[in-house]
């Protein structure tokens, strides 16, 4: 039987499942995106307004000109941008003595999995990323033989409160001696 711990912060929910005993000794960490009804309502309202304007102009003037066509093209591109691959959940499955499986589940039902053997992981790294627009935390893996860091969460940017237990579990799995540092 698995024990589960859940923490909700902002639009993310962190779920930690730990199996008991040798056959179920999988340490699963999930970051789930909580969907709001407000976002869907705003998207529908935006679409309606964007579609209504060229239609109104079409009925008012009685002819279709380039402004109407460009309005419809821009509306289509914006809708596609808003509906682009929404992520439902990203997971880190730690398999002791085997490796780490990174999993991303999209709203379309598509799941992308990537397995990293424990022998290739040198160290998990928790870094703060600062850009001119925003600041966020990132969890990465230093991989033996690779020049670049491997991001654990490729699509989502969960808060450090959710990343810290995953970082500690990864440190414990690869027996990294620097796991004793405290994170606030």
Image (cartoon, rainbow, N blue to C red):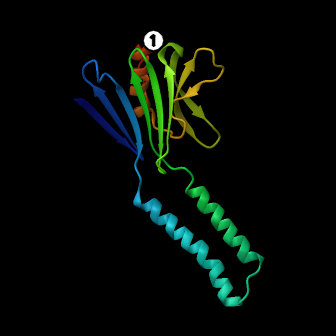
- Horizontal and vertical percent position of residue 104: 48, 39
From this viewpoint, is residue 184 visible?
no
Quadrant location of the N terminus in the rendered image: top left
Residue topped by disc 1: 176
User: In the picture shown, does residue 178 fall above or below 113?
Assistant: above
* Residue that sits furthest to the right in the current view: 66
For this rendering, which residue is in front, 1 or 123?
Answer: 1
146 on left or right of 98: right
Q: How many marks?
A: 1
Tell me the residue at 73%/87% (across/down).
63
From this viewpoint, is residue 122 visible?
yes
Quadrant location of the C terminus in the rendered image: top left
83 on left or right of 57: left
- Horizontal and vertical percent position of residue 163: 44, 30
- Horizontal and vertical percent position of residue 26: 34, 24
* Residue that sits furthest to the top in the current view: 177
Q: Secondary structure at mark 1?
A: loop
Tell me the residue at 60%/24% (across/down).
149
For this rendering, which residue is in front, 127 or 29?
Answer: 29
Tell me the residue at 38%/31% (across/down).
29
For this rendering, which residue is in front, 105 or 48?
Answer: 105
- Horizontal and vertical percent position of residue 65: 76, 80
72 on left or right of 175: right
């Amino acid at each position: 039987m698995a024990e589960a711990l859940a923490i909700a912060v902002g639009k993310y929910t962190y779920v930690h499942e730990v199996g008991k005993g040798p056959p179920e000794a999988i340490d699963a960490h999930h970051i789930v995106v909580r969907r709001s009804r407000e976002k869907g309502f705003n998207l529908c309202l935006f679409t309606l307004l964007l579609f209504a304007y060229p239609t109104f102009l079409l009925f008012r003037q009685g002819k279709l000109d380039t402004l109407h066509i460009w309005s419809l093209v821009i509306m289509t591109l914006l809708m596609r941008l808003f509906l682009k691959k929404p992520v439902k959940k990203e997971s880190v499955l730690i398999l002791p003595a085997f490796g780490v499986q990174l999993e991303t589940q999209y709203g379309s039902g598509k799941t992308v999995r990537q397995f990293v053997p424990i022998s290739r992981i040198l160290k998990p790294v928790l870094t703060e990323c600062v850009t001119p627009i925003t600041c966020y935390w990132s969890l990465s893996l230093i991989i033996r033989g690779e020049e670049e860091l491997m991001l654990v969460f490729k699509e989502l940017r969960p808060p450090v409160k959710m990343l810290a237990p995953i970082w500690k579990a990864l440190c414990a799995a690869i027996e990294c001696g620097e796991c004793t540092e405290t994170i606030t």
